Image: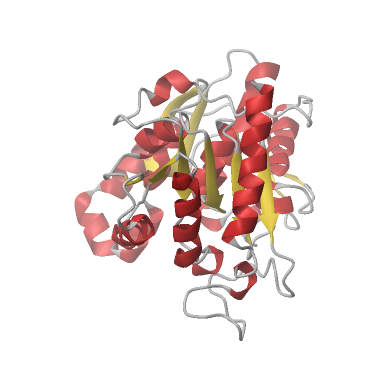
């Protein structure tokens, strides 16, 4: 999800440089709603490569891959740009009809993807992923852009009103991610929740699957000002985030949505490097560990000091530290207002 959100500024750049440009976007079915938030996206072509790979026989019987291919090849495109440059995105680019552009062999995310492209570009991996995608699309379409200006281009009207009424002001705690190496300890989330609610703020806890819902319930406990959300769509969650006073989160998709919506946010990093993939936007504060093996990019923590699912590098980022930083961020917003 984060990768999709981080692609949005590149679309905004292109729309400014090429008024009237329209995009068809191939995206994973789980996050297809993100693509609908940008006004220059005309057609969303949802794929299910991961699900089809897990259940090939069921996929064949359903006819979904055939329907996907038919939609992908329904027209010939003026330009096909693979901004992810992974094997599955390269496959989609190769199956579509039109001239194909992407990163060269030294710049792709997954080696081998470069063979799908007819025009290839060298784009430094030392840049933030947002800037890499902005540069790739600009070079493919032949325009310049101002790197210092960042606009995700989200049309807030497309998010609609929040799906349920919440007492304001409230914080959104983005507590779950698919990598256990990114997860802040549950006890820390509970302590932070107590501090926030004692200060008169509500705390809203979204989730995406049953394990995340159970974590949200553990964090909320008996605290009546901590609300575990019901099952909501991605757009419905974004509408709630758009009304938040601030968020505290991990390196995961909803944190990138908060940044894209210009919501003040404290985001905690350990296994990943905010300089390469951090949530970018106004009023974003990154808390990164200075642990020896930080930015390991491992999905699970293997350090000898790890306890259960608590990554060793995040234990030193205490609730007190996060609360202090969050208070300062909220005070800055209040003064600005």
Left of 181 or right of it: where is 9? right
Q: Residue 146: where, in percent of width, then height?
A: 79, 26
**Colour scheme in the image?**
secondary structure
Q: Residue at x 35, y 34 (%)?
A: 236
Residue at the front extreme, as displayed: 198
Q: Residue 304: where, in percent of width, then height?
A: 61, 86
Q: Residue 283: where, in percent of width, then height?
A: 67, 35
* Residue 42 vertical position relative to residue 120 in the rendered view, above or below: above
Q: Residue at x 48, y 34 (%)?
A: 25
* Residue 282 vertical position relative to residue 106 in the rendered view, above or below: above
Out of 140 and 230, give the one closest to the viewer.
230
Quadrant holding the C terminus: top right
Q: Quadrant of residue 168?
A: top left
* Residue 165 vertical position relative to residue 204 in the rendered view, above or below: above
| Viewer can see residue 84 | no
* Residue 54 vertical position relative to residue 43 in the rendered view, above or below: below
Out of 245 and 252, give the one closest to the viewer.
245
Out of 112 and 169, give the one closest to the viewer.
169
Left of 283 or right of it: where is 41? left
Residue at the left extreme, as displayed: 61
Left of 206 or right of it: where is 103? right
Residue at the bottom extreme, as displayed: 304
Q: Residue at x 62, y 42 (%)?
A: 327
| Viewer can see residue 158 | yes
Q: Residue 217: where, in percent of width, then height?
A: 31, 57
Q: Residue at x 62, y 60 (%)?
A: 110
């Amino acid at each position: 999800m984060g990768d999709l959100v981080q692609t949005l500024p590149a679309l905004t750049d292109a729309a400014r440089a090429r008024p009237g440009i329209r995009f068809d976007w191939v995206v994973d079915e789980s996050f297809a709603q993100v693509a609908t938030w940008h006004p220059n996206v005309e057609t969303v072509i949802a794929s299910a490569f991961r699900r089809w790979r897990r259940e090939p026989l069921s996929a064949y019987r359903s006819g979904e891959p055939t329907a996907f291919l038919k939609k992908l090849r329904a027209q010939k495109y003026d330009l096909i740009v693979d901004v992810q440059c992974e094997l599955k995105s390269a496959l989609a680019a190769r199956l579509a009809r039109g001239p194909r552009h992407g990163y060269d062999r030294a710049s792709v995310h997954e080696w081998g993807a470069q063979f799908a492209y007819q025009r290839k570009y060298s784009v430094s991996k030392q840049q933030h992923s947002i800037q890499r995608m902005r540069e790739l699309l600009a070079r493919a379409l032949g325009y310049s852009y101002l790197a210092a200006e960042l606009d995700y281009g989200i049309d807030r009207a497309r998010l609609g009103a929040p799906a349920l009424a919440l007492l304001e002001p409230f914080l959104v705690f983005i507590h779950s991610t698919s990598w256990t190496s990114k997860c802040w300890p549950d006890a820390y989330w509970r302590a932070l929740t107590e501090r926030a609610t004692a200060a008169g703020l509500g705390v809203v806890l979204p989730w995406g699957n049953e394990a995340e819902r159970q974590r949200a319930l553990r964090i909320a406990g008996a605290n009546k000002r901590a609300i575990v959300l019901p099952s909501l769509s991605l757009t419905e969650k974004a509408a709630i985030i758009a009304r938040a006073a601030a968020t505290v989160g991990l390196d995961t998709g909803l944190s990138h949505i908060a940044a894209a919506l210009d919501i003040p946010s404290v985001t905690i990093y350990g296994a990943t490097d905010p300089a390469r993939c951090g949530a970018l936007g106004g009023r974003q504060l990154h808390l990164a560990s200075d642990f020896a093996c930080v930015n390991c990019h491992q999905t699970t923590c293997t350090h000898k000091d790890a306890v259960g699912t608590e990554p060793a590098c995040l234990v030193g980022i205490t609730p007190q530290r996060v609360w202090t930083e969050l208070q300062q961020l909220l005070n800055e917003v209040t003064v600005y207002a």
